[in-house]
Amino acid sequence: MNVTRQQLLLGVLMLMGVVRIGDYVLSSMIQGPLRELQGENRELLANITKQEKLLAVGREAGQKIEQWQKKSLPSDTETARSLYRNWLLETVRSAKLRNAAVNSGSPASRRGLYRTMPFTVQARGNLKEITSALFSVEKSNQLHRITTLRLTPVGTTGQFDLSMSVEALIIPGARATSLNKGESTLLSSTNRRDYDVIAHDNIFGIGIDTKDPMKLTILSAVTYRNGEPTVWITEQIDDRVLKLPAGAEFETTAINGRVVTVTEESVVIESGEQLLKMDIGQSFADAVVTSGS
């Protein structure tokens, strides 16, 4: 069978047409959807990776919230106020600070995420005692922080009036009915003695008398005038004598206070939130704490 040139050319054209049609079919009906599917698959994988990261962040946040709840004050505000205030007062007293008083304010909501409860501390002592108190506060593993701290020198006696503000947190969902007893891991050192260098430095640049005013302030006598008892308090540091009737308020280098009761042999003085009982001849350092408000 003879094939003419026209037939051969027509066959070539038909073959080229088939090839083009096949290429179109491959490109539009197979490769196109395949590329689209591959693109969707990459987008899906990217979304999965993103969601896994968000899930990991969520799990981490959940663990943090759980840890915060364990460190939080109890969710009941009155319970939280009473427990933390008593703890803060006992912490200050344990450091042997005097004139100690702790007050609390009203809780405040922070964007509905948590609540803050403010506390203020007033006390007097030397730098070593103040450092000890601050160390105990910072060492406690609770959700709290010292927001302000002011130290005012009492002359050159080595005593300082401490005024401190503390903020504690209440986290929603906290189930604790007591304060967290753990210890913080955020301190540079967990050994209190490592901070004694603070008390040794003359940070105020003033001459300091290292004598203990508590030992040098004495209940020297009780006398009577018109049948009413009068307390004599002698400050040996300043060579000063205070003569006070029952109910009188006074201020000494050692403590500030109020004479509560007077007998022929002893006196009860209210200082801060403590009642101190002393016999005639005893110094304030020898006072016995009978109770507190």
Image (cartoon, helix red, strand yellow):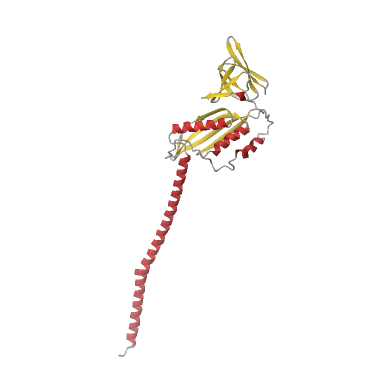
**Residue 165 drawn above or below residue 249:** below
Q: Residue at x 37, y 67 (%)?
A: 32
Q: Residue 161 location in percent, x, y?
A: 60, 29
- Can you tell which quarter of the image residue 189 is in? top right
Viewer-proximal residue among 178 and 201? 178
Q: Residue 26 location in percent, x, y?
A: 36, 71
Horizontal side of residue 201 vs 17, given as left or right: right
How many marks the image carries: the answer is 0
**Residue 285 drawn above or below residue 145:** above
Q: Residue at x 41, y 56 (%)?
A: 48
Q: Residue 204 location in percent, x, y?
A: 66, 34
Q: Residue reaching furthest left? A: 1
Q: Residue at x 62, y 31 (%)?
A: 126
Q: Residue 231 location in percent, x, y?
A: 60, 16
**Residue 162 drawn above or below residue 235:** below
Q: Residue reaching furthest bottom? A: 2
Q: Residue at x 34, y 80 (%)?
A: 15
**Residue 270 drawn above or below residue 120:** above
Q: Residue reaching furthest top? A: 226
Quarter of the picture holding the N terminus? bottom left
Viewer-proximal residue among 24 and 244? 244
